[in-house]
Image: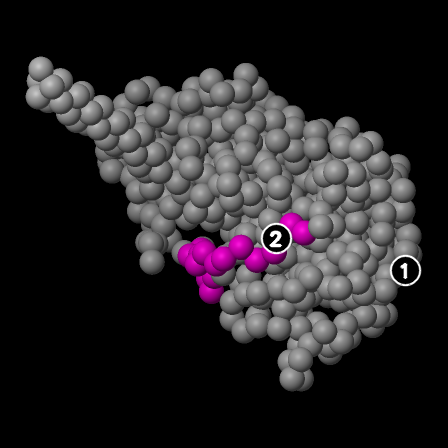
Amino acid sequence: MRAIAKCTMLFVLAKLFVLNASAQNHAQLQIDSNEMLYRPAQHFTPLKGWMNDPNGMFYLDGVYHLYYQHYPNATVWGPMHWGHATSRDLMHWEHKPIAIYPDSIGMIFSGSAVVDKNNSSGLGINGKAPLIAIFTQHNMDGEKAGKIDFQNQSIAYSNDGGISWKMYAGNPVVKNPGIKDFRDPKVIWHEASKKWVMIVAVKNKVSLYSSSNLIAWSKESDFGTELGSHDGVWECPDLFSLEYNKKQYWVLTVSINPGGPNKGSATQYFVGNFDGKQFTANSTKTKWMDYGADNYAGVTWSNTGDRKISIGWMSNWLYAQQVPTVNWRSATTTARALSLQTVKGEMYLSSLPVKEVKFAASKSIQGISEKIASAYKINIPSVSLQDFTISLSNKQGEHIDFGYDQKTNQFFIDRTNAGNHDFNSEFAVKHFAPRISNAHSTNLEIIIDKASIEMFADNGLTVMTDIFFPTSPYTKINVISKDRSLKEKVTISNYLTP
C-alpha cells in the first residue's frame, strides 16, 4: 500500500509540476506576444517597470543622456527614481543602471540637469566640469500627514559623466514656500545676465529663480496667473530661446493635467521675451505643442547650443496605468526639433522629427498589402485642401484612421476601432486638431510604430500624437479621397534598425 501511495503521490507531484510549468510557459508566451505587439521598434521604453516624465536630459561628448521618472518594481506609478539611458543618435538607446534613488528627504520627482562648465557650484574635481541635476523631492509621509510643504528642490552632482550621482549634503537647496504644488525645476544658463535661471511649476503658474552657483537661489518673478489654460495643475515647465528672422525669442512651455484640448494631459506654450528676471508673452492666445492625447511633460535637452530638441512622455494620465502592456508601461515620443513660424502675425512653435531619425528610401504605397515593417514613416507631400483619410488595418478588421476634414479645417486621428480599448472608457475616441497654417496646400509626415502614431502637419505647425493597441499588427494601408492622384503621391519608408 505504501508503494502504491508513494507512486500516486509522485504522479500527482509530477502532474502539478507539468501544470505549473505549462502555466509559466503560457504566461511567458503572453508576455512575449505582448512584447511583439506593443514594444516599440523606434521609441524608447524602460526594460521593465513604470516610466513617466523625461528628466535631466543633457548632451555631452557626443552622447545624449535621458533620465526619466521610473518605478522599477511595478508597472504602475510608485516611489519615483531616475532611470537612465544614453544614445548617440536619439534613436537607439542603451539602458544604464538607475541613476538616482529616493532618500530620507523624499522620492525623486521631475527635474533637469546641466553641465556646470565653469564649476560655479564648486562640486567638480580635478578641473573637470561637474554635472548638476536639480529635481523635486516629494516627501510622501509629509503629504499623508496633511502638510503642504512636502515638495522641495534638491540637487545631486556627477563627476563621471552622468553615470553615478551623489546627493548634495545641503539639500534641499530651494525650500517649499508654503504651497502644495511646487515642483519640476528646469535650469538653464542665461548668457546675457551670466547666471543660472530656474523655472518651477507652482500650482497654476510658474516661478522664476536665479543663482550664481546652482546652490543658493533667489526668486525673481512669477508668470502665468492670467494667461493660458488653467483647467488643471501646471507641471514640467521649460524655458529656452529660438532664433527667428535673425531675432531671438523665448519660449516657455508648461504641461497641464487635466485640461488638454483632447482631454487629460497636454502641453501648452507661450512665445515672448525673457530678460533674466521676467518672462513676457507676446500673445494672450492659448497654444498647444501637440493636439493628440499622448504627448506630455516634454522638455528640451541642455547643452545643445542653438539647436533645441524636445522629447515627451507618450501617454496620458487618463489611462497611463491601465494600458495593456505587461512588463513595462509607457514610451517616449520621437525626439523633435523645435523652431518658430509666423501665421498672420502670430508666432507659433513647430516641431518635426530630428534629422537623426532615419528611414529607408521611400516607395509608393500602391501594391502594399501584407508586408509593413514594425515602424515606418508615411509622407504626404504638398496636396490640395480636401478631405482625405488614410486607414491602417489588420486581419481582425481593426483600424486606425487619420487625415484632414476640409469642412471643419481640422486634422484628425480616429482610434475608435483601433483595437483593445476595454481598459478605459475614454480611450476609443476621435481626436481633432485645428489647422494653423493658411497655406493653400498641406503636407504631412507621419511616424507609425507598433502602438503609436505621430502626425506632423504643415511642417510641424499642427502636431498630433496618439497611442493604440491592436490585437494583431496592422498590415494594410488604404487611402480614401476624391482626389484619385493622392494614392500615387503618398509614400512609405521603413525605419532603419541598427
User: Vertically, is 198 above or below 63?
Assistant: above
Q: In which quarter of the image is residue 288?
A: top right
Q: Name the residue carrying label 2.
A: 101
Where is residue 48? Give x, y as percent. 45, 43
Residue name at image x 65 percent, y 64 percent: 166
Q: What stretch is highlighted in magenta?
A: 87-103
Label tally: 2
User: Vertically, is 35 above or below 188?
Assistant: above
Disc 1 and disc 2: Cα gap in Å?
A: 27 Å
| Badge 2 element | loop
User: Vertically, is 162 above or below 432?
Assistant: below
Image quarter where the C terminus lies is bottom left
Q: Looking at the picture, tell me which residue is in the foreground, 464 or 221.
A: 221
Residue name at image x 57 percent, y 19 percent: 426
Where is residue 30? Give x, y as percent. 31, 30
| Badge 1 element | strand
| Left or right of 248 on screen, residue 438 | left
Residue name at image x 79 percent, y 62 percent: 170
User: Which label belongs to residue 218?
Assistant: 1
Q: Which amino acid does label 2 sit on?
A: Tyr
Magenta span contains residue 100: yes
Where is residue 329? Give x, y as percent. 49, 37
Magenta span contains residue 85: no
Residue name at image x 69 percent, y 62 percent: 167
Q: Quadrant of residue 283?
A: top right
Q: Return the residue found at the far bottom.
A: 127
User: Which label belongs to residue 83?
Assistant: none
Q: Residues within 10 Å of mark 2 (few under 14, many from 20)?
A: some
Where is residue 72? Give x, y as percent. 51, 44
Among numbered discs 1 and 2, the one appearing first in the sequence: 2
Q: Can residue 186 be seen in this view?
A: no
Q: Which amino acid does label 1 sit on?
A: Ser
